[in-house]
Image (cartoon, grey):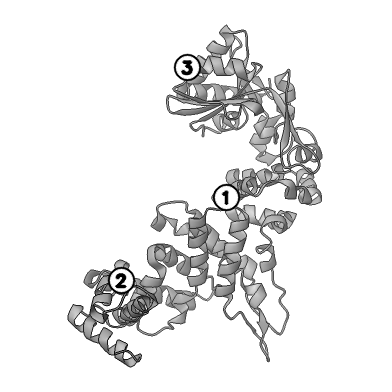
Amino acid sequence: MDPITEAGVDIATSTLMKRAPIAFELANEFKSQGKRLALVGGSVRDAILGRLGNDLDFTTDAHPDLTKRILSKRLEHLWDTGARFGTISGRSDGFLIEITTYRSESYQQDSRKPSVEFGETIEVDLSRRDFTINAMALELTTKSPEFIDPYQGVVDLAKKLIRTPLTPEISFSDDPLRMLRAIRFASQLDFAIDDEVRRAIVAMRGRLEIISAERVREEFTKIILSGQPRLGITLLVESGLAEIFIPEVPRLQLEVDEHHHHKDVYQHSLTVLEQAIALEDRLKGPNLVIRLAALLHDIGKPKTKRLIDGGGVSFHHHEVVGAKMTRERLKSLRFDAELIKQVSQLVFLHLRFHGYGNGEWTDSAVRRYVRDAGDLLEHLHVLTRADCTTRNRAKAEALAKSYDSLEDRITKLAQEEELSKIRPDLDGQEIMKVLGIKPGPLVGKAYEHLLELRIEEGPLGKERAEMELLTWWRLNGNT
């Protein structure tokens, strides 16, 4: 056994013994039935990297029915929804455990669903896994743990390299989602992708179209939430995969000519993403909403680009167009409705700060800013600050100082008023009583009028609010 492999075995075994002794307990149960059990895939990879979590993946030569019977005696919770794919899952001692019968899995040319066959040996099972770093196993039912690594995954792990066990063409034909997974692992682990794998992704990118939007969304989400999302997005764009499921991002690479200068919108967006991540402590850690908003905030620019006579470019109302495009794209990727609403709202609001100019913020402007942001105010603070990518230090400092001033104004006014809960001084029932009207559109219009007064002037008090309401009523032709 070479030194790298030997070190990998020692680290993985030691980590497993300290972190998850339940693995050896399960192995004894399978051994008593004359069956094999091995820790496999990402669990082995993470054990070697010293980052083993609470998810443990195993493979076995036992049929799923036998696996279920064995686990029913040992695990606290058990479910067999994946039994047709050979997987039985459960929870015990704080661990999520998945045990899968040796198998091979592949897609037909135009099918969205994989066909699964149970295999006879662990070597065949490993050959059909996505990457060499996930094609390692630690056999636990032998006298001492046996490391199985037919494709030198531990060497690739040491090299920080993403490579496939068989040819990448076979691997990506078996499951086209693996093209996205290659980029996901590169961005999560800060690994390089093997040149042969890169070429195969470019050549076979169209195969991604047979994969369901939900599975694509899950991998894309992991890329966005990874430690190196800029690397992931760059690989998606350069490989052509982004064109398949989120074409708005590569289209940010707008052509620049010598007469009509503007900043590189694509690179700007990647920088905004990184700068938003640097401010995520304000949002209590990695935040999918702010990361998506940062990446997509300018996607309306290609559609709104206009050349200005004499040089220069305009992108009028790109925030409005971009918000609509964001909703449509995230909906097509099957993101949940609340996330779609939040991200598109941030895209819509991302220029709001600049719309107020550099002057002193009035109380009404502050109230309107807070009202429009709602529960996303802290997200908007992060996005607005991240959106400053100028290399002009003086300009950057001036913008930061201006936004500091806005946040100070919000804090000061919040101490005097309930800015986060701005409401008119009269509610709907009180409006109907004052005006003597029944529920209907007029109540809503009256409510909006009082809300605008509240934003412009602050709390009015009920007496003045009633007077203002009656004046508005008369001026609109009512008696």
Please indicate, yes or no, whether residue 388 appears anywhere in the rendered image.
no
Q: Residue at x 55, y 74 (%)?
A: 320
Q: Nearer the viewer, mark 1 or mark 2?
A: 2
Question: In the drawing, does residue 417 fall left or right of residue 364?
Answer: left
Residue at 65% across, 32% down: 134
**Which mark sits nearer the N-terminus, 3 or 1?**
3
Asked which quadrant contains residue 433, the reply is bottom left
Please name whichever residue, 223 or 452, is drawn nearer the observer in this view of the structure: 452
Residue toward you, 126 or 177: 177
- Local SS, label 3: loop
Residue shown at 56%/53% (left/top)? 335
Residue 475 locus on image (x, y percent)? 32, 92
**Residue pointed to by mark 2:** 422
From the viewer's perspective, is residue 318 above or below residue 292?
below
Q: Return the x and y of residue 404 as percentages of the image width and height.
A: 36, 72
Q: What's the amino acid at mark 2?
A: Ile
Instruction: Count all numbered tags in the image, as a single digit.
Output: 3
Residues packed near mark 3 inside 10 Å, few (<14), some (14 to 19) or many (20 plus): some
In the picture of the structure, the residue carrying the numbered disc 3 is 74
The circle drawn on residue 221 is 1
Q: Residue furthest left?
A: 463
Residue at mark 3 to residue at mark 1: CA–CA distance? 34 Å
Which badge, 1 or 2, is on the more N-terminal residue?
1
Residue type at mark 3 is Arg
Could you tell me if residue 353 is visible in this image? yes
